[in-house]
Image (tube, rainbow, N blue to C red):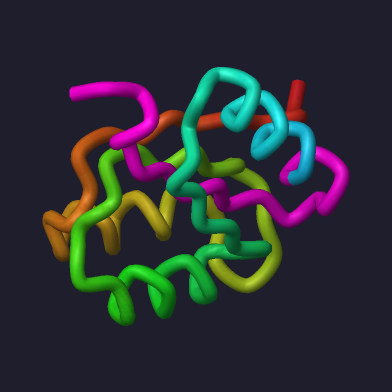
């Protein structure tokens, strides 16, 4: 699979960090990027997609639905290939 064919979802409540992740992915050649500010919004985007997401990059500490709960939902849906966990926590 070519990098430009990989679909990625960035789930990050901090807008600056989300923009930076998207910019880094673009610089790597990733063009299929969805973004969500928290877990519930990410799940709604996933439900609306026809094709599954290859990689989800998720923050752990988010309001409403944290990263661990999102990962549990993703596991139940089996709609994501891989998950990368990020965090600004110590």
88 w.r.t. 68: above or below: above
Q: Which residue is drawn at 26% across and 57% down?
A: 74
Left/right placement of residue 8 relative to residue 58 reads: left
Image coords of residue 43 (percent x, y) = 39, 71
Residue stretch in magenta: 1-18
Q: Report which quarter residue 47 is drawn in.
A: bottom left
Left/right placement of residue 65 relative to residue 1 reads: right
Judging depth in this view, the residue of 9 and 77 nearest the camera is 9
Left/right placement of residue 65 relative to residue 51 reads: right
- The answer to whether residue 52 is magenta is no
Q: Which residue is drawn at 29% across and 72% down?
A: 49
Judging depth in this view, the residue of 63 and 56 nearest the camera is 56
Q: Report which quarter residue 60 is drawn in.
A: top right
Image coords of residue 17 (percent x, y) = 79, 39
Image coords of residue 13 (percent x, y) = 73, 56
Judging depth in this view, the residue of 78 and 53 nearest the camera is 53
- The answer to whether residue 3 is magenta is yes
Quadrant location, the N terminus: top left
Left/right placement of residue 23 relative to residue 71 reads: right
Q: Residue at x 29, y 55 (%)?
A: 72
Judging depth in this view, the residue of 64 and 11 nearest the camera is 11
Quadrant location, the C terminus: top right
């Amino acid at each position: 699979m070519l990098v430009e064919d990989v679909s990625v979802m960035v789930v990050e409540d901090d807008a600056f960090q989300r923009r930076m992740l998207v910019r880094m992915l673009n610089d790597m050649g990733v063009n299929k990027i969805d973004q969500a500010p928290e877990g519930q919004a990410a799940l709604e985007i996933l439900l609306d997609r026809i094709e599954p997401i290859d990689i989800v990059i998720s923050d752990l500490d988010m309001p409403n639905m944290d990263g661990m709960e999102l990962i549990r939902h993703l596991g139940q849906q089996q709609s994501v290939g891989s998950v990368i966990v990020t965090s600004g926590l110590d």
